[in-house]
Amino acid sequence: MSNVIEFTKYTDETAPKGADVILAGAKKNFGFLPEPLARMAESPAIVEAFMSANGIFGKTSLTPLEREVLVMRVATGHGCEYCVAMHTGLLKKVGAADELIEKLRSRDTLNDAHLQAMIDFVDELQLTHGAVRNESLQAFLDAGYTKQQSLEVVLGISVYTMSTYANRLTKAPLDDAFEKFRWEMPSVS
């Protein structure tokens, strides 16, 4: 039986060069240093890539709610318990209804056709590795999205695939700030 490999929990003072400045900025932004970033700093390249790409994703034409719906779909699909808890808090911050949040967390069909079209498109992109059927793209466009936004969805999936994979690899524990939004991946029977 092998021991569990643990990743170092860095601070902005102990992080490798390049990651230190990024962690200091995150600490200032959140008021604390989120566990995933503290561990992701093992590789200054990935912490920089994630923070940079996430900043770019935040500048897309997708609304904050649409971005969070996308993130929750990726996070629940990848089983990133930290991401689901954190983004539950962010959904509340952008004014999402509790019913919507619960449906996203349980991967149920949404009552909002526009947001469900986002979910369907995210699923199709991931399932086909980008080779979506024309009908799927048309359904996304018919729901009021644009071709530009279809590519912005690709960006969001990419950013949050990086994050969810890193968070699961490093086994980042949930910060106290998100404890009230704890989510556990349902077990497969």
Image (spheres, rainbow, N blue to C red):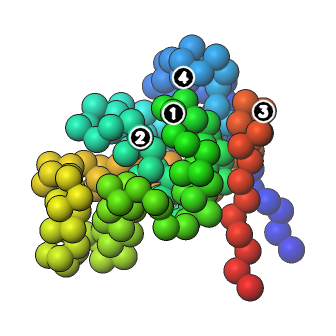
Which residue is the extreme one toward the top?
A: 28
Give me the residue at 57% from left, 14% from top. Answer: 28
**Tag shown at residue 65:** 2
Among the two numbered marks 3 and 1 on one chain, the one whose residue lies closer to the N terminus: 1
Choose mark 3 or mark 4, whichever is in front: 3
Tag 4 and tag 2, C-beta contact below 8 Å: no
Mark 2 Cα shell of 10 Å, populated few (<14), some (14-19), many (≥20):
some
Q: What amino acid does circle 4 point to?
A: Ala
- Mark on residue 95? 1
Residue visible at 36% across and 68% down in the picture: 120
Structural distance between the alpha carbons of marks 3 and 4: 16 Å
Q: Which element is circle 1 on? A: loop
Q: Secondary structure at mark 2?
A: helix
- Disc with the residue nearer the chain's start (1 vs 2): 2
The amino acid on which the numbered mark 2 sits, given as a three-letter code, is Leu
Q: Most extreme residue toward the front, as rendered? A: 111
Tag 3, which secondary structure?
Answer: helix
Asked if the residue at tag 2 contacts the one at tag 1, i.e. Cβ–Cβ closer than 8 Å, the answer is yes
Residue tagged by mark 4? 26
The correct choice, above or below, for 22 with respect to 46 in the image is above
Label 1 Cα crowd, 10 Å radius (few <14 / some 14-19 / many 20+) = few
